[in-house]
Image (spheres, rainbow, N blue to C red):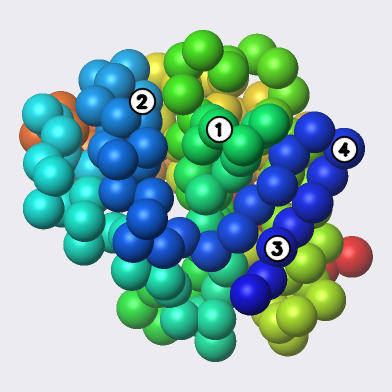
Amino acid sequence: MTRLVTRRLMMRRTEPADLEALHALVSHHDVVKMTATWPWPAERDHTRARCVPSDPQLGMVGQVFHKGELVGSMGIALRDGQLPEMGYMFAPAHWGRGFATEMGQALIAHCWQRYDWTEISACVFGDNPASGRVLEKLGFVATGPCRGYCRARDAELPTLTYRLSRP
């Protein structure tokens, strides 16, 4: 099983045993309101469906741990024939600690080594500037505004798209 290890964190592919900890993460409205696909309120069946290991041929999607505790979820994967897309969410208690940047660097390096992708995309809602700053620290460049759907808010929202080119 693929594991990414940094100075403070470990990431591995999602597995069914992650259900309770992942469900606790997505039970924070402040977390899921910044994602495209997670519902609010959190639905256990939706979380259970997302606890199936991702297809390694399509990318790396997994859970991020700090000292054995699930603190976030992160991944880069192909979706519907589009560019691979990066996404992440972390528990509010761990915001501002650099975890997204730290694991993001390791995940991007892994994906450049493992896959023949030439670019990685990402999107952030306009009211989430902290996530945009994380992407910029990772080397992503903003490519323009658009609108994106947020299931937790049941709304189309101003969104900013980003791209990262292979070095």
Where residue 13 appears, as percent x and y from the top left, is 53, 64
Q: Earlier in the sequence, mark 2 or mark 3?
A: 3
Q: Earlier in the sequence, mark 1 or mark 3?
A: 3
Residue 166 relative to residue 160: left or right = right
Can residue 65 be seen in this snapshot? Answer: yes
Label 1–label 2 contact, CB within 8 A: no
Element at label 3: strand
Q: From the viewer's perspective, is residue 145 above or below residue 92?
A: below
- Disc 4/disc 3 C-alpha distance (Å): 13 Å
Q: From the viewer's perspective, is residue 118 above or below residue 40?
A: below
Q: From the viewer's perspective, is residue 124 above or below residue 116?
A: above
Can residue 83 be seen in this snapshot? Answer: no
Give the residue drawn at x 60%, y 59%: 12
Q: Which residue in the structure is indicated by mark 4?
A: 7
- Disc 1/disc 3 C-alpha distance (Å): 15 Å
Q: Which residue in the structure is indicated by mark 3?
A: 3
Where residue 23 appears, as percent x and y from the top left, is 27, 38
Report the disc number at residue 31: 2
For the N terminus, which image quadrant? bottom right
- Disc 1/disc 2 C-alpha distance (Å): 17 Å
Give the residue drawn at x 36%, y 31%: 25
Report the disc number at residue 142: none
Q: Which residue in the structure is indicated by mark 1?
A: 69
Callout 1 amino acid? Glu
For the C terminus, which image quadrant? bottom right
Looking at the rendering, which quadrant does residue 112 occupy? bottom right
Give the residue drawn at x 58%, y 68%: 60
Element at label 4: loop
Q: Earlier in the sequence, mark 4 or mark 1?
A: 4
